[in-house]
Amino acid sequence: CTDTALDRLVSDIGPLEYFWLGIEDLPLGHALKLRRLKTGLLALPNLISLDDDAAYALGGWEFGGRPIRTLDIESPLSVKAARGIVGKAPPKDMCDSPLHLSLPSLSPMVADCLRQHTHELSVGIRDDELTPEVAEILAKHDGYELQIWLPRRISEAAQLALSGNPSKRVSIQKDGTLIYVVDCSWWSSSYEEQKPPLDINQL
């Protein structure tokens, strides 16, 4: 995506409910241009990698106008990029917006950065398992809801580590590949897996 094309995309449009951009690379200059958008959701589903400086730019969106950010990234996230995309904690009279990330793997240091996000956080781990060490870190998520997507069933050791925070409740769904970690004060029946109705013929 050229500078000229991106300038035309983000100029004099909005506010938008949703802005989807299928670029593979996001240099700092382009990330800063995207910050001019007034949109409820920014989706970047085809990123090969996320540059550290670009991550800080996307994490520097002003509170109050910060969109939901959903990024699919082919390469592992660096610690600096993870710290950048989360950004600073919002002031007491404001809140952050949800953050959705799809990553090939998740290291303990990156998990420790991401768990400091103060709103809804969704992390998809595409190619690796959730280790007990990473699970123990994610259980300390600062926000009220954490959603974890896995390529295969969560191990018993990782499940036990996720359950180690007494202020959180854990829901295991979709045969162990979707996990919710939720503040006890926010828990509702919607986090409990809904079983399909019984088939009278099977009965």
Image (tube, grey):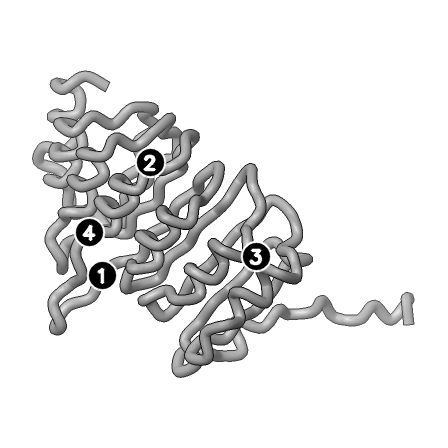
Q: Amino acid under label 1?
A: Asp
Q: Is residue 18 visible?
A: no
**First in sequence: mark 3 or mark 2?**
2
- At label 2, counting other C-alpha atoms closer than 10 Å, the crowd grade (few under 14, some 14-19, many 20 or more) is some
Vertical arrangement, residue 171 with respect to residue 64, above or below? below
Q: Which residue is mark 4?
A: 87
Q: Which is more foreground, mark 3 or mark 4? A: 4
Vertical arrangement, residue 55 with respect to residue 112, above or below? above
User: Which residue shows up at 56% across the image and 37% down it?
Assistant: 127
Residue 85, image x and y in percent?
25, 45
**First in sequence: mark 2 or mark 4?**
2
Q: Is residue 31 visible?
A: yes
Q: Are marks 1 and 3 in contact (CB under 8 Å)?
A: no
**First in sequence: mark 2 or mark 1?**
2
**First in sequence: mark 1 or mark 3?**
1
Q: Secondary structure at mark 3?
A: strand
* Residue 41 badge: none
